Image (cartoon, rainbow, N blue to C red):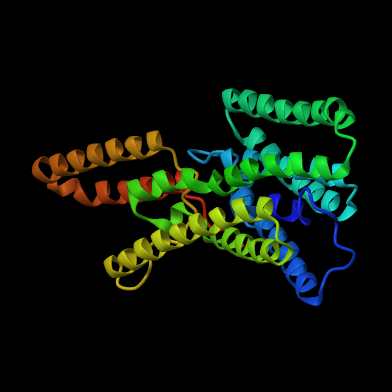
Amino acid sequence: MEPAGAMEPAGQDTPAELTPAQTAVLILGYLSTFYVLLAPLKTIRAIKAAGAVGQETATMYLCVLCNSLVWLLYGVGADDKAIMGINGIGVLFQAYFLYVFIRASTDRFKQCSYVAMVLAASASVAIYVYVFPFIPDPKDRKKAFGQAGIFSGLAMYCGSWGRFRTVWRKGNVVRDLDLNVVVSSLLNGICWSIYAMLIDDDLLLTPNAVGIGLAEFQLGVYAWYYYMGSNDNNGDGGDDNINLLRDDDDEEEDDDHNNRRDDEEDDGDNNNRHDGGDDDNEEELLAPGRQATYRIQTIE
């Protein structure tokens, strides 16, 4: 994770000892980083159980993977085992998430994911092998990777914005936006922004301050749509099923199927009213099957 990666002021001397306040905020920063890593687990488990990804994308996981790799190299350059450790864990988490995606995705998506991961890993190795020898000073290494971490951190915070296309189109944040991802991003940005101000590190502060603004906006959108959904559903707040994996093509197919069933039902009522009971029973048998095909219940 980018925030956990930039623990020290890039380009400055490492402080001999952290103050109690800095230590406390640093611990909170680590906890918030683990929250970010664990936030998508519900979605990943649902994808693994369903064996399909639908319209869900791996953009966020690829962004976090690249971000973790950048700050892992930052830790290597700074010879900081704590930074290397937490970002190494981040790489493992994202690699597992992408592995689940690849197994549940189409061949085309697998190819794209493989290429992206290979490029990210190759770039990391190339930087380590070819760039580090030309930057012998650890302070210069930290500054170089800290600057790269600004862009990777911004990409990480923006990675979840692909979900908003679905939210704006459907207006159901309960199904189409993972609240854990938004809340974890907000807490992560707050903790590491406070720490950056305590140690006077602008490279660490910049991406996390922007991340706070993005997360606050997403929470505002979530609250608005949740409030509107609660009014529409008499306080229920919408459907709590995970519907992230439902394809647009599936929705269109269901609409066509439902329209055909309505037409058939109307024809049956007009021409064969004595068979209406059998038709209703048949529809009741068909409907749950269709729904079960595309519905994915929340996995606790």
Spot occupied by residue 23 in the image (x, y as percentages of width and height): 80, 71
Percent position of residue 152, x then y: 64, 41
Left or right: 87 as drawn, with respect to 187: right
Q: Is residue 209 left or right of residue 99?
A: left
**Foreground of the two, 10 or 236:** 10
The answer to whether any part of residue 43 appears in the image is yes
- Residue drawn at x 69%, y 54% is 3
- What is the x, y in percent for residue 184? 60, 61
203 vs 248: above or below = below
Residue at 67% x, 38% y is 98
- Hey, which residue is sitting farthest left in the picture? 270
Given residues 226 and 213, the one toward you in this image is 213
- Residue drawn at x 72%, y 64% is 29
The one of 102 and 258 positioned closer to us in this rendering: 102
Q: Quadrant of the C terminus?
A: bottom right
Q: Is residue 85 left or right of residue 212?
A: right
Picture layout, residue 161 above or below residue 16: above
- Position of 290 with respect to 182 (left or right) is left
Location of residue 238 (image quadrant) = bottom left
Of all residues, the one furthest to the bottom in this rendering is 20
- Residue 100 occupies which quadrant of the picture? top right
